[in-house]
Image (cartoon, grey):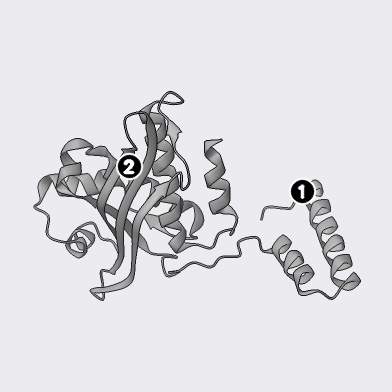
Amino acid sequence: MKLISGRMFNQVVWIFVLGSGLLFATSGCSTVLTVAYLFHPEDVPAEYNELRGKHVVVVCKPIVELEFTDAGTARELADRIGANIRENVRGVKIISQQEVSRWLDENAWVDYATLGEAVDADIVVGIDLDHFSLHEGSTLYRGRTTVHMQVHDVNDDLIVFDKRMEDFTFPADSAIPTADQSEQQFRGLFLRILSSRLSRCFHAYESRAHFAEENLIY
């Protein structure tokens, strides 16, 4: 069993003492919420929390135009989402994108459930990438995408979660000059933000995370 370090223990004690002092010194609701946040900062629950202990495959299917212009985007997005789920959902097993690619190379596309059954998955996180762009004009970067994500229960042959993200934009209220970074750098940043937003459907997270991401451009 991993023991808590002395330094970490002291930090926990001080948080407890501070929280208790604040709680008893005042009776305001905001104080109670502040103390609760210190102990449970992941204050936004998962929208779908049934991935724990399951074999999960993440599959991203782009529109035909994107397959020709940027074939790697869909696979990279699926890989990043899978990595985020693995990091934040206890006991989940993520089936590799190499296995997904191997099956797609050898078989004609049917549907997400068929692929899931073929790779022995319990759950398929299927993502339709309906639009994806990185530029706003010729001198600015601003990522835009429309995504439809469904969770398929392979054993029961059911869609158990459905979410559509219409015209997701990053940065939300500005753009980045192309002189500031390469297209490859911005593409990586945009996919990082997008994969984080989508994977948060499956685990609790801090409400301030969205705000922190917007500040990554500064």
In the visual, does 103 lie left or right of 137? Answer: left
> Which quadrant, please, contains the N terminus?
bottom right
* In this view, 197 is above or below 160: above
Observer able to see residue 123: no
Judged from this view, the residue extending furthest toward the top is 179
> Label 1 amino acid?
Ser
The mark lying in front, picked from 2 and 1, is 2
Q: Residue at x 19, y 45 (%)?
A: 102
Q: Residue at x 81, y 58 (%)?
A: 15
At mark 1, the secondary structure is loop
Q: Nearer the viewer, residue 35 or 84?
A: 35
Residue behind mark 2: 76
Observer able to see residue 118: yes
Crowding at dot 2, Cα within 10 Å, few <14 / some 14-19 / many 20+, comes out as some
Q: Position of residue 148 (x, y in %)?
A: 29, 60
Q: Residue at x 25, y 69 (%)?
A: 154
* In this view, 82 is above or below 201: above
In the visual, does 37 lie left or right of 186? Answer: right
* Number of the label disc, if any, that sits on residue 5: 1
* Number of the label disc, if any, that sits on residue 17: none
> Label 2 amino acid?
Glu
> Which quadrant, please, contains the C terminus?
top right
